[in-house]
């Protein structure tokens, strides 16, 4: 019973954060969501919980492909946008391989790459 209430609270809190966020803050939320999903996937992998590991990795890939990658402006973003596009593609591919091979090191590599970009993004003033 408490878990249902806790999940409902988290959902309302997330919806409030998203509705009040600037475009810059929305990107930070996407990074946070992808990073959290990768961490969760690693925990599930270590516990041998294969179905939930797969769900967490799928969530991370979805955030990267349909959130971060789709927010790039390849026409005006120039070389930076192109490089980020390629890096996001690489991370997504590595997440698939990590899922297939239960490779915790690949998950960590993906986390580190994404976290580096996220840290730089957080430092950018709006």
Image (cartoon, rainbow, N blue to C red):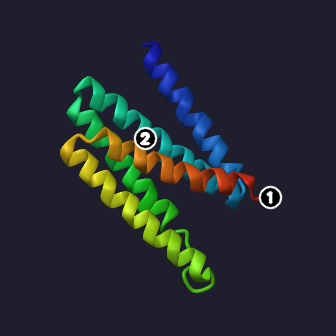
Left or right of 52, for residue 9: right
Query: Given the current orientation, which residue lies at the most extreme right position?
Result: 125
For the N terminus, give its image quadrant: top left
85 sits to left or right of 55:
right
Judging depth in this view, the residue of 67 and 2 nearest the camera is 67
CB atoms at circles 2 and 1 under 8 Å apart? Answer: no
Residue extending farthest top? 1
- The picture places residue 9, in percent across and down from the top left corner, at 56, 27
The residue that appears at 51% across and 53% down in the rendered structure is 114
Q: Position of residue 81 (x, y in %)?
A: 56, 75
Where is 87 relative to 5, above or below? below
Q: Based on the displayed image, in which of its 4 quarters is residue 45 positioned?
A: top left
x 71%, y 49%: residue: 20
Mark found first going from the N terminus, 2 or 1: 2
Q: Nearer the viewer, residue 86 or 25?
A: 86
Task: Indicate the secondary structure of the residue bearing disc 2.
Answer: helix
The numbered disc on residue 37 is 2
Q: Residue at x 58, y 56 (%)?
A: 117
Q: CA distance from mark 2 to mark 1?
A: 26 Å
Residue 4: numbered disc: none
- Please give the name of the residue rendered at 46% of the width and 46% of the height, measured from the top-left corner: 111
Q: Is residue 108 above or below residue 91?
A: above
The residue at the far bottom in this view is: 75
Horizontal and vertical percent position of residue 44: 31, 30
Position of residue 54 relative to residue 70, above or below, is above
Give how far across and how far down residue 126 sits, in percent: 79, 60
Mark 1 Cα within 10 Å, few/some/many (few <14, many 20+)? few
Q: Secondary structure at mark 1?
A: loop
| Residue ID for mark 1 | 125
- Left or right for 43, reference 63: left
């Amino acid at each position: 019973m408490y878990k249902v209430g806790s999940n409902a609270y988290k959902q309302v809190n997330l919806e409030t954060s998203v509705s009040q966020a600037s475009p810059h803050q929305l990107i930070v939320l996407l990074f946070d969501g992808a990073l959290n999903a990768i961490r969760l996937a690693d925990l599930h992998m270590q516990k041998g919980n294969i179905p939930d590991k797969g769900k967490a990795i799928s969530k991370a890939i979805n955030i990267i492909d349909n959130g971060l990658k789709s927010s790039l402006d390849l026409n005006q973003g120039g070389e930076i946008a192109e490089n980020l596009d390629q890096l996001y593609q690489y991370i997504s591919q590595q997440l698939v391989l990590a899922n297939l091979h239960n490779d915790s090191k690949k998950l960590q590599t993906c986390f580190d790459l994404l976290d580096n970009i996220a840290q730089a993004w957080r430092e950018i003033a709006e």
